[in-house]
Image (cartoon, helix red, strand yellow):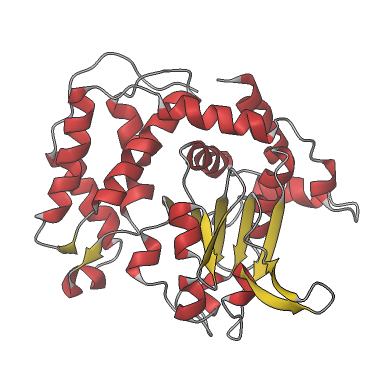
Amino acid sequence: MNKKIADLRMEMNKVIKGKDDIIVKIIMTVLASGHILLEDNPGLGKTTLAKTFSKATSMQDNRIQFTPDTMPSDILGYSMYNQREGKMEFVKGPVFTNLLLADEINRTSSKTQAALLEAMAEATATVDNVTYQLPKPFITIATQNPITSGGTQALPDSQLDRFMVRLSMGYPDVQSQVEMLMEDHGQNPIDAVQPVMSVEDLIQMRTDVANVYISYEIADYISRLVDATRHHDKIECGISPRGTKAFANMAKACAYMYDRNYVIPEDVMYVIYDIFKHRLILTPSARREKNGAENIIYDICQTTEAPSMAGERSN
């Protein structure tokens, strides 16, 4: 594994205990130039994870705490009249940063949620018919509480599709919880995190990931998996072309994480659940089933033949 990535994992493990798989997928998604949705109950470390990642990668970060009265201008910025200069000037909002932490994004209105669509898709923000370029890289890590929580409003499908992955941290195991308690000396654990890569390093790695090779066999495999979601009798709406590209890019990032410049079927299988689960729109009967989406994805994986290729993923 790339030394800088290994160092990044180590720094994040200082704060986030027992969640190495989530840390790996966060890194993969950022390397794949994607955005991340963290869905979990309150208090499980979603915000802490995002801030730890930001510090370890030397990125500028801003945080927005979404509430029912948050307005689009609170995200993008606004124009105001400068009396001294005698002209209108633009005041940038918190979206003008490298890493935007959109905290509890599903507590705000659809209008405000939609203000992030352009930023996430094109890394630009348009205010008063003027389009501004956002800093590079621009990454959104959004957190949301389960939709059964009070005061939440589900993200529309169009916005969910902008997130490359939806991840869930879950509760820490007993040993990880013990470590957290033993290391709690009244200090913020993020203070111990050291930057281990620069923004320039991250941009170069994203370029390297984009150049990872996907063979015809792998492209065909990805396409057949996606096509199966579009013809499954328990799925009303399958994976979009945007989702297909996200799938391929995430598989590339997985290969890169493990020092390969080509994708193998194991990379595809490693990321498929995180790419597919939040994009599938199930039939009403399938939605009533426990773990409906997971079972459908498993069925698709089992019935879609993988290409025979040498190589396997290793830690």
* Rendering coords of residue 184 (x, y %): 85, 52
Q: Quadrant of the N terminus?
A: top right
- Looking at the image, residue 158 lies above or below residue 255: below
| Front residue of this view, candidates 118 and 34 | 118
Q: Residue at x 58, y 70 (%)?
A: 104
- Identify the residue at image location x=68%, y=63%: 63
Question: Camera-side residue: 153 or 291?
Answer: 153
Q: Which residue extends farthest top? A: 310
Picture quadrant of residue 246: top left
Quadrant of the rendered structure where residue 95 is? bottom right
Residue 183 place in picture, x, y as percent? 83, 46
Looking at the image, which residue sits at the far right? 186
Q: Residue at x 61, y 28 (%)?
A: 5
* Residue toward you, 80 or 279: 80
- The total of numbered circles placed on residues is 0
Name the residue located 31 percent from the left edge and 58 percent from the top edge.
279
194 on left or right of 283: right
- Residue 311 on image: x %, y %: 33, 15
The image shows residue 282, relative to residue 67, as above or below, that is above
Instruction: Locate residue 149, reporting x and y percent.
Output: 51, 79
Look at the image and tell me whether residue 300 can be seen.
yes
Residue 40 visible, this angle: no
Residue 155 vertical placement versus 6 (above, below): below
Q: Is residue 94 above or below residue 230?
A: below
